[in-house]
């Protein structure tokens, strides 16, 4: 009987995580809540309930992982709970970020205005319906997303008619990508149930992807797809898929050297062929201007570690130098680890997140997804710590 209770406990914590997330989404959906994009604030109650429920959900998620580590669980049940968690935010409004409207605006610059989103910002077309819903601070910014994602966004624009539909499409695609990534994590990892829960039960991923529609979910599912193909020795296709992930969002390319160090020649060949083909296609479509996609200027986020150092009194230049030095030293150490036979992609993602001056909450999903498939306790703990750290950034107080 005791053993039976132990075996059901992880699943019960997963269900409780889903319930806590549902309460958070209900709070976000109430009238007067500032949590939805465009929400008009009428008091802090909705924000407090949203954050409290999300924090409780995250704590239950962490407890579920501990219980799974000890007692294990049935993979099918873990996946069903993961699907529920990742779909719950679709029942609510678009949460906290206008990014999906930026995706739409960049697509329309090409498809409706016959211009280049890597050269021309949305502000050039002030009467366009997409420009009107882009966050004001980003209307003068050209695209920072990969050409493959821009092409995908053009397809979304052609298939939709309103900002509400656009947001729902991007959110649905991101949610489905997260579910696919969860299945891939279970396929790749040795401890399949634990890997599926580590990724699929995380409420931060649900809020960021089904709630916010961020394109990081596409990058992550493509990277995990590449790792799954490589595990089956389908290296050429794996290399091509990793390059496609980089053509969605640049961080995949920053992590690629760690994977290349221990990869077989066909992986290198797949990267080369896909890279050359993508380079030619993107240049034909957008000229050479798309090569600036990693540029964010001097943008800083208040939750970024270098900015935190400044808040504690460290001079701006010194804080950025420390972050840059940590990035270089950490990258060299990780490359050495890879040369010795241990590719630590999740730690690499942690390093990127911890040293960037532009840290947004959904960036914390990168190390979570990669830590799910690696037997790296340090990376898993650090990934969860980063996710917990940025959790409070989900509330617009």
Image: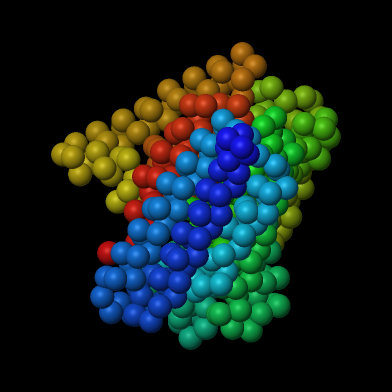
Q: Quadrant of the C terminus?
A: bottom left
Front-lying residue, 142 or 391: 391
User: Can residue 124 be seen here?
Assistant: no
Image position, residue 206 (x, y; %): 54, 57
Place residue 29 in its image quadrant.
bottom left
Q: What percent of the width, then of the height, locates residue 5? A: 58, 40
Quarter of the image where one finds residue 51: bottom left
Question: What is the number of callouts on the image?
Answer: 0
Q: Nearer the viewer, residue 356 or 206?
A: 206
| Residue 69 placement (x, y as % from top left) | 57, 32
**Taking the image as drawn, is residue 91 in sight?**
yes
Residue found at the far top of this picture: 340
Q: In the shown orientation, is residue 193 left or right of residue 327?
A: right
Task: Name which residue lies at 77% across and 24% down.
Answer: 264
What residue do we see at 71% from left, 58% from top?
Answer: 284
Image quadrant holding the N terminus, namely: top right
Name the residue: 56% across, 54% down.
15
- Along the horizontal axis of the image, is 136 left or right of 206? left
Q: Residue at x 74, y 55 (%)?
A: 281
């Amino acid at each position: 009987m005791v053993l039976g209770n132990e075996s059901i406990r992880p699943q019960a914590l997963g269900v409780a995580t889903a319930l806590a997330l549902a309460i958070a989404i209900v709070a976000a959906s109430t009238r007067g809540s500032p949590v939805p994009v465009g929400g008009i604030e009428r008091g802090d109650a909705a924000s407090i309930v949203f954050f409290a429920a999300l924090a409780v959900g995250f704590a239950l998620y962490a407890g579920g992982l501990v219980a799974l580590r000890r007692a294990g669980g049935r993979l099918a049940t873990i996946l069903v709970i993961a699907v529920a968690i990742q779909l719950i935010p679709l029942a609510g409004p678009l949460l906290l970020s206008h990014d999906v409207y930026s995706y739409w605006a960049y697509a329309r610059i090409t498809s409706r205005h016959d211009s280049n989103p890597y050269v021309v910002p949305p502000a050039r077309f002030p009467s366009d319906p997409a420009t009107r819903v882009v966050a004001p601070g980003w209307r003068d910014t050209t695209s920072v997303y990969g050409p493959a994602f821009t092409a995908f966004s053009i397809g979304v624009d052609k298939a939709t008619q309103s900002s509400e539909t656009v947001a729902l499409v991007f959110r649905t695609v991101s949610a489905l990508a997260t579910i696919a990534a969860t299945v891939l994590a279970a396929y790749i990892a040795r401890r399949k149930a634990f890997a599926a829960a580590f990724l699929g039960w995380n409420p931060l991923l649900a809020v960021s992807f089904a709630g916010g529609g961020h394109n990081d979910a596409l990058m992550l599912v493509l990277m995990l797809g590449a790792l799954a193909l490589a595990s089956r020795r389908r290296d050429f296709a794996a290399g091509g898929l990793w390059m496609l992930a980089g053509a969605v969002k640049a961080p995949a390319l920053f992590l690629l050297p760690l994977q290349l160090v221990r990869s077989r020649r066909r992986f290198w060949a797949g990267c080369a062929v896909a890279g050359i083909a993508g380079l030619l296609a993107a240049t034909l479509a957008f000229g050479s201007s798309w090569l600036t996609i990693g540029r964010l200027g001097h943008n800083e986020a208040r939750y970024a570690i270098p900015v935190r150092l400044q808040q504690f009194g460290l001079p701006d230049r010194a804080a950025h130098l420390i972050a840059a030095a940590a990035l270089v030293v950490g990258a060299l150490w990780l490359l050495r680890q890879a040369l010795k036979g241990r590719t630590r992609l999740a730690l690499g993602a942690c390093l990127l997140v911890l040293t960037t001056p532009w840290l947004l909450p959904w960036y914390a999903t990168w190390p979570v997804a990669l830590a799910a498939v690696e037997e790296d306790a340090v990376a898993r703990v650090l990934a969860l710590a980063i996710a917990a750290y940025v959790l409070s950034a989900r509330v617009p107080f």
